Every structure is written in structure tokens, then in C-alpha cells.
Amino acid sequence: MSLTSRLVAGAFFAFFPLSYGSAQTAAKTLAMDFRTTVLVQGTPDSAVMFGHAVGTTEKMRLDVRGSASQVSPLGGDSVITMIVTDSGKTITFIDNKRSQYLRVRPAEMVAQAQQMGGVKMEFSGTDAKVDSLGAGPTILGHPTTHYRVATGMTMTVNAMGQQQVVKFASTTDGYFATDLIGTLNPFSSLSGTDVANMFGSANAEFAQKIKAVQAKLPKGTQLRASSSATIVTQGQTRVTTSSAEVTALNWVTTDPKLFQIPSGYTQAQLPGLSGPGTGAVPPK
């Protein structure tokens, strides 16, 4: 796998709609169904994903199906399960069809890429800001407030005598419930949180700006988001528009086994990468 391929793979994981959640009560955990649609400019069809998420402050589980779920490194199974821990820094993919699992740490993937082949990454033009736009629509019976987050940065990669410049920019509109406190949010990466996790160690300035943005966002549960992201590299521009919406909310009692790797599952490897950053957590 080439350097560019490794970084693109990491970007998929970083932009994939993942986050972790917290329970609002001690006895029950917030669970939600959601739908995400992704359209890449120049492609004829939209990628649609349907998912179910349930989580606590320690971990979150997502079960997703649909064409958008094929970004999983384990392939295009009809249903892909992910367990997200460490505030989104660690993602464990579970392939029930093949009885395999794989742990991915996007930030460590970037670090490995820099260590292999004399890779040097430089960042410039980092930007992240948030604006409050007032009241939003009522969603699932909950009043919402509307916020807009804009992020951007330029990444210059030097490796094996070659240089590549990649420019990222995105604008996201988020709608947060004003009467429902909780942080379960399976598409929070649209506002840049997971990108900060991925590049945080290499681009501390951007990570700090993202943290400042997150601190200004409301504490209510996010029920809808829409995003437009632009990536420019090698003279080509790719624009991806995404929309995500919670379709159902429930308070449930969770089984601890939901967040464990099933016994007997074997470790899968991400091609071109090795080491602890891509190893899987043994079943507990």
C-alpha cells in the first residue's frame, strides 16, 4: 500500500461518522437509529447508510448497513459492527460473517506513515470556527438550536523525493436538541472531531482549534447534520456532501457483551500497516 493510499485509508476512518456517547441516567443508556447519505461529486449514485448506535462515556457500538458502510477495512459485509473507544481514538471493526476483527487508531496510522520511507508532513492554513445561527426546526418532537462549523487546512507530504499538497475544507450545519442532554452522536466527525484525533499529534494547532470549537457547541444531543467537504490534490477537486439524521431515540439497558469481541474471532490486518496501532484487542 502506497503512502497516499495509507493516508486516504486513514482519512476514510477519520471522516467516517463516529464518536462516542454518554448516558443521561445511571440505569439507562441512550440508543438511536440514524441515516446518513453521502454524495461525491462526479459519481452517479449516493451512498446511503442506516445505523444503530448505543453507548456510554467509555465506549460506543455501531451496527451499520448500506453502501456507505463499505469503507470498513474488513470489506463490504451487509452489516458492519464497530466498537469505538478512547473518545473516538480507537475503532474496532467486527466482521461477523468472516469471524474477524480489526482495531484501527487513525492517529497512529499517520505516525507510522511518517516513520516509513522518510515521510515528512507539514501543515499550514489551519482554521476552525463556529457560529450560532439561532433556533432550528423541531426534530422527533425536540426543539433544536442551529450551529455552523467551518474547518480547513493544507497538508504538504514529502516522501521518497516526491511532494504532494492536499487542501481540506468543510462546512457543517448541526442541529442540537435543547431539551435532551447527552453526547451520543454517531456523526459528530462531520464537525472535524475525528480529523483532530487523526492529525492531532502532527498538527497541534488544528487540534487545539477543533477543541475550542467543540467547547462552544451546545451539550444537547445532535439530531441532524449536513456537511460539504472539499479536498484538492494534484490539481483535482473532490466535493463530498453528507447529510445525517437521527430517526429514532430510546433509553435502553445494555448488555456488556455488546461491547466485546466475540470469542473465537481472529485478527485481520490492514494491508501495508503493522504494529500495535492496527492490532486488535484480545477478547475479554
Image (cartoon, rainbow, N blue to C red):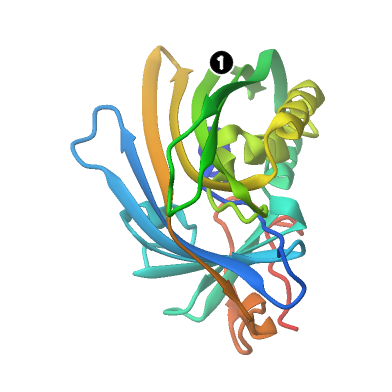
Residue 89 visible? The answer is no
Q: Amino acid at mark 1?
A: Val
Q: Callout 1: few (<14), some (14-19), or many (20+) C-alpha neighbours within 10 Å?
A: some
Say which quarter of the image contains residue 100: bottom right
Using the image, determine if residue 66 lies above or below residue 45: below
Which residue is at a point 69% across and 52% down the rendered structure image? 88
Which residue is at a point 76% across and 29% down the rendered structure image? 207
Label 1 belongs to which residue? 165
Residue 204 horizontal side relative to residue 195, left or right: right
Q: Secondary structure at mark 1?
A: strand
Q: Quadrant of the C terminus?
A: bottom right
Which residue is at a point 18% across and 36% down the rendered structure image? 44
Residue 34 position within the rendered picture, expressed as x and y whole percent measured from the top left = 43, 57
Residue 244 position within the rendered picture, expressed as x and y whole percent measured from the top left = 42, 45
Using the image, determine if residue 80 lies above or below residue 4: below
Looking at the picture, tell me which residue is in the foreground, 67 or 275.
Answer: 67
Looking at the picture, tell me which residue is in the foreground, 204 or 27.
Answer: 27
Q: Residue furthest bottom?
A: 264
Residue 41 position within the rendered picture, expressed as x and y whole percent measured from the top left = 29, 27
Residue 166 horizontal side relative to residue 284, left or right: left
Looking at the picture, tell me which residue is in the foreground, 265 or 60.
Answer: 60
Residue 186 position within the rendered picture, expressed as x and y whole percent measured from the top left = 55, 53
Residue 186 horizontal side relative to residue 60, left or right: left
Using the image, determine if residue 169 lies above or below residue 220: above
Using the image, determine if residue 24 lies above or below residue 217: below
